[in-house]
Image (cartoon, grey):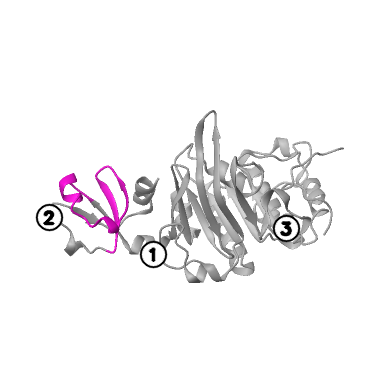
Amino acid sequence: MSLNLPWWRAPRASAPANAGLQLHGQASALAAAAAPSAAAHGLRLGYGGKPVLQDTDWQLQPGQVVGLLGRNGSGKTTLLECLLGLRDPQAGQVLLFGQPATRLDDAARARIGYVPQQSDLFEELNADELLAYFRSFYPRWNAAKVDGLLSRWELPRDIPIGRLSGGQQQRLSIIRALAHEPDLLVLDEPVASLDPLARRDFLRELIEQVLDRGTTVVFSTHILSDLERVAFQVAFLQAGRIALQAPLDQLVDETLLVQGPERQLMQLPADSVLARHGERWLLRGVGESALPGGLIAQKPTLEDLFEVLT
């Protein structure tokens, strides 16, 4: 059987980070001290004359767990595919481990794990056959982890993949991405087909991967409660750019969601306004006692942040 595979499915056979709340693009001394696992500079891409990415800059530091948030159609999948060199931007560049994403050497390719939004498994193979095939391409393959996950997630090993449920296929995609212990793990809606218990188990495995190996993880999801469990940082994609990336706990602790009449909102210091959505404004560096009368303030939830920042 001949299989023509993109690099992230079969490489050629050979051998935390930012602290503080800041607008994306304002580098901290701590971030500058570490070489990023991935760095996108000035990405531009559009379809049919409609811009999707617009001079997008983004960096992922070693050991970061970043949740990528954006509205439907905002370009999350496009950004992740550009980040991995699977889609060529019309302008800009991506570096992975210091190498151009579209010209990675074999050693760099073997350091990346990817779970796409749509399953791409070979439906005629069973789980054992699929994983044995991929194992031949990776010198760093954790067979014990694979066997443990197959058993714990109760995945049948001898049934053709095409006969597995959508959730089972997604679990198998995740196992394949984790098996070679990547240094950069990119997941596009990885839990969309999983039930709550399977999602919880996967998220636990994800955290262990990060804590044990210092893996850089970026994942998009529309299930905000899952993101709150594991994402140390969140990045918001808005109008084709990363509008803000920050540690989630600091973003919640150090900001204030304010709403009220526009006349009162316009009295707020301009440099304190992170984002606005109608009559709901997100502020930093301002206490409730300093607000003009007539405004209502509260600590934002992640859902509030999603609404205002995307």
The residue carrying mark 1 is 250
How far apart are the alpha carbons under marks 2 and 3?
Answer: 56 Å
Q: Quadrant of the C terminus?
A: top left
Q: Which residues, given as a range, are shown in magenta?
A: 259-285
Q: Nearer the viewer, residue 100 or 126?
A: 100
Q: Residue type at mark 2: give it.
A: Gly
Q: Residue 204 at what x, y percent from top left?
A: 56, 60
Q: Residue at x 70, y 53 (%)?
A: 150
How many numbered marks have been drawn onto this rendered protein structure?
3
Residue 202 visible to the viewer: no
Instruction: Write the residue at 86% across / 38% down.
Output: 2
Question: Can you identify the residue that label 2 sits on?
Answer: 293
Question: How many neighbours does mark 2 have within 10 angstroms: few (below 14), some (14-19), or many (20 or more)?
Answer: few
| Type of amino acid under label 3 | Ala
Between the C-alphas of marks 2 and 1, the distance is 26 Å
- Circle 2: element type: loop
Q: Disc 2 or 3, which lies upstream in sequence? A: 3
Q: Residues within 10 Å of mark 3 (few under 14, many from 20)?
A: some
Up the image or down, 111 lies above or below 55; here it is below
Can residue 106 be seen here?
Answer: yes
User: What percent of the width, then of the height, locates residue 253?
Assistant: 34, 64
Identified by mark 1, the residue type is: Gln
Residue named by callout 3: 108
